């Protein structure tokens, strides 16, 4: 707890310094206004010019979010690898949270690795190609193309994705094709219904406002919660 408190204090001081806020020793005698209030560069008209954070964008890559510019650059230079790694993290966190907070633990490390690898090997790369194709076939961000994309995603892509997901888990577990088929038959509709409760609204925002290269990062941010549902459904016996 002491370490955490100290970390918060140090981080706050560094953040204040980055924005050009530093204590100033008053030379006047007696009571006076606090130096932070009367002397802060942020209260001056040209505060953005005085702060090193605003003046030099290389100090904090990506502006106010450290590493964002580097991540954006990686999306441009190596989109498939970057999205694959992003999905690996998203699926890792989704299953870890499901095992700890829903199933109550202990952590099944094999299952965690299996689902994380699925995010890396399939979710990220397939999402890259699918959304590129979808944007090419149905361009635009008006109401008609946006709603059409949502329909295609949920009515066609969702069942395909879920079927691949159950097949992958079955093959990793050494299940027979008959067992895998029964799993898909029994749980595919449940998985799609769960998706239909969450993703239409998410994708309305996605296809309307999110640029193509940021779709997979955006989806993974939302999908951490949805992956908790999928990880529990996927671990259920056929």
Image (cartoon, rainbow, N blue to C red):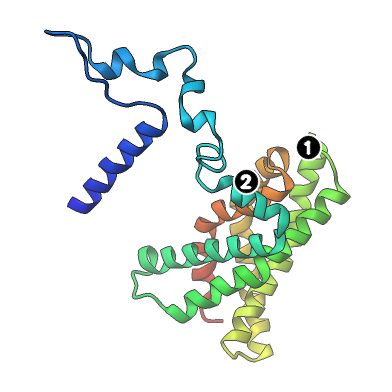
228 shown above or below 236: above
Read off the residue under disc 2. 202
Residue located 52% across and 81% down the image: 237
As drawn, the label of residue 141 is: 1
Quarter residue 101 falls in? bottom left
Q: Nearer the viewer, mark 1 or mark 2?
A: 1
125 shown above or below 35: below
Residue located 61% across and 83% down the image: 170
Q: Is residue 100 left or right of residue 55?
A: left
Quarter residue 86 falls in? bottom right
Q: Is residue 34 visible?
A: yes
Q: Are marks 1 and 2 in contact (CB under 8 Å)?
A: no
Place of residue 197 in the rendered image (x, y in percent of width and height, measured from the top left)? 59, 51
As drawn, the label of residue 197 is: none
- Quick one: quadrant of the C terminus? bottom right
Place of residue 167 in the rendered image (x, y in percent of width and height, measured from the top left)? 66, 79
Place of residue 71 in the rendered image (x, y in percent of width and height, measured from the top left)? 60, 52
Place of residue 29 in the rendered image (x, y in percent of width and height, measured from the top left)? 13, 8
Q: Nearer the viewer, residue 137 or 58?
A: 58
Q: Is residue 182 left or right of residue 50?
A: right
Badge 2 element: helix
Q: Is residue 141 left or right of residue 216?
A: right
Q: Nearer the viewer, residue 144 or 119?
A: 119
Would you call the spot at circle 1 few (<14 residues within 10 Å), some (14-19), or many (20 or more)?
Answer: some
């Amino acid at each position: 707890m002491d370490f955490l408190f100290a970390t918060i204090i140090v981080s706050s001081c560094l953040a204040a310094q980055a924005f050009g806020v530093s204590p100033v020793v008053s030379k006047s005698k007696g009571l006076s206004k606090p130096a932070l209030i009367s002397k802060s560069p942020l209260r001056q008209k040209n505060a953005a010019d005085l702060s090193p954070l605003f003046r030099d964008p290389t100090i904090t890559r990506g502006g106010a979010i450290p590493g964002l510019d580097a991540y954006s650059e990686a999306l441009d230079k190596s989109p498939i690898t970057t999205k694959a790694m992003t999905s690996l993290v998203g699926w890792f966190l989704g299953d870890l949270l499901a095992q700890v907070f829903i199933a109550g633990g202990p952590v099944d490390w094999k299952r965690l690795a299996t689902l994380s690898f699925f995010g890396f090997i399939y979710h990220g790369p397939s999402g890259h190609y699918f959304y590129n194709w979808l944007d090419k076939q149905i361009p635009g961000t008006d109401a008609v193309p946006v709603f059409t994309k949502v329909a295609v995603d949920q009515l066609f892509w969702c069942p395909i994705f879920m079927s691949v997901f159950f097949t992958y888990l079955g093959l990793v577990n050494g299940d027979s094709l008959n067992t895998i088929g029964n799993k898909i038959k029994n749980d595919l509709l449940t998985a799609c219904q769960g998706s239909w409760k969450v993703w239409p609204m998410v994708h309305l925002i996605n296809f309307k406002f999110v640029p193509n290269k940021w779709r997979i990062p955006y989806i993974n941010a939302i999908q951490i919660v949805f992956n908790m549902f999928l990880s529990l459904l996927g671990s259920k016996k056929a």
